Amino acid sequence: MKLNSARGRNFSLRKGNFLPRKEVRKKATSSKSSSSNLSPRKIKGVSSVDKARFVLSSLGVSGLRSLRSGALKQIQINSPGRAFLKKNPGLMRFFLKSIPEIKIRGGVKKGAVEISAFNPRDSSSFHSFMYLLRVKRKKFIVKELSNPVFPVDAHTQFVLHKKLASINPHLRRWNSEVLEYSFAFQNKRVSYLVGEFVGGITLEKWLRQDKRNENSAVFQRFLKAEKVLKKKLGIKDVTTRNVIYSPKTDKLVFIDLMQ
C-alpha cells in the first residue's frame, strides 16, 4: 500500500513478520554467552526477577520460556524498546509475576520500578485491563488483551502502528503523529501492548469542553490527518476517541488504530 504525498514522496507499508517460535529457541541458544552480562539482578531492589527464564541479547529479547501460565509465543519490539529492556533486564518477568497483586492492591513498587492499575473503570471491550509502568523517569501504558480479541490483538496493533509511523514526517505538517508502540508480547491466553505514556486528553473530550472547538485549527488539523489515514491508508476507525491532544504541546497523537 502506498501513499503519494503532495510533495511527491511515496510512503510504503510493508508486511511485517513475526519471529517463529523455533527460531526464537535457536537464537536463544546461540546468544547465551553474549547475554550473561544482562542478569536480572541488576534491577535495583527487584529480587523477584532473579529467576527469570528469558535472556536479553545485544539485539533484544532472544529467548522466551515458561512465563506466567504459558510460554510467550511472540514478541515484537522497536529500537527504543529494545534499548529500554537491555537497561532493565527481567522487567517483563517482574511485570507478569506482579499482575495478580496489582489487580488486588492496585499496584506494586520495588526499587525504581512501579506498576499500577490505570483507568480501572474503563469499560472498553477491546482490553481487559490497563497498567501504568514507571521506571525512573520513563512512563509506559500497558494494555492487556484477552486472546483472541476481535478484531485486533497486541501484535497486530504493534505491527500496524509501526507501519503507520513511517508516515509521521508527512503528518507533522499538522503537528500530528501515529504512536509507535515500544513492544508487544503474549502467551496463550493474554497479549500485552506497551507504548510510551502520552500526556493529554482524548480529542473527543477536548471537543466536548467547548462547542467552539469544533471550528478550531486543532480540529481542522485532525480532519486533514484523518483523511490521509482513512482514504490513503485504509484505516477505518480513525475517530476523536483514538487521538490524544495535549494543549501544552498543541500536538495530536493517534493511538489504538485498527485496519
Image (cartoon, rainbow, N blue to C red):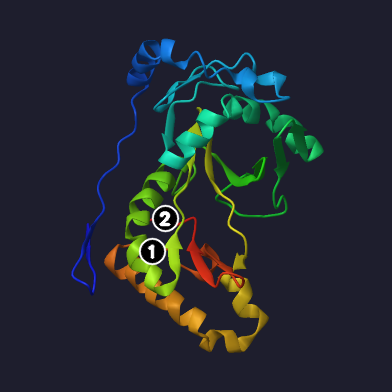
Residue 169, numbered circle? none
From the viewer's side, name the closer residue of 197 and 161: 197
Q: Quadrant of the C terminus?
A: bottom left
Q: Position of residue 156 (x, y in %)?
A: 40, 44
Q: Residue at (37%, 61%) from the top-left corner?
A: 168
**Farthest residue in the right direction?**
105
In percent of the image, x 49 and y 84: which residue is there?
217
- Lateral position of residue 65 relative to residue 117, left or right: left
Amino acid type at circle 1 is Lys
Image disc number at residue 236: 1
Q: Position of residue 95 (x, y in %)?
A: 64, 31
Compared with residue 26, is residue 236 higher up or lower down, i.e. above or below? below
In this rendering, position of residue 182 left or right of residue 97: left
Tell me the crowding category of disc 1: few under 14, some 14 to 19, or many 20 or more residues within 10 angstroms, Cα based.
few
Q: Position of residue 250 (x, y in %)?
A: 55, 73
Task: Tell me the residue that label 2 is attached to.
Answer: 258
Do the residues bearing badges 1 and 2 touch, measured as CB atoms within 8 Å? yes
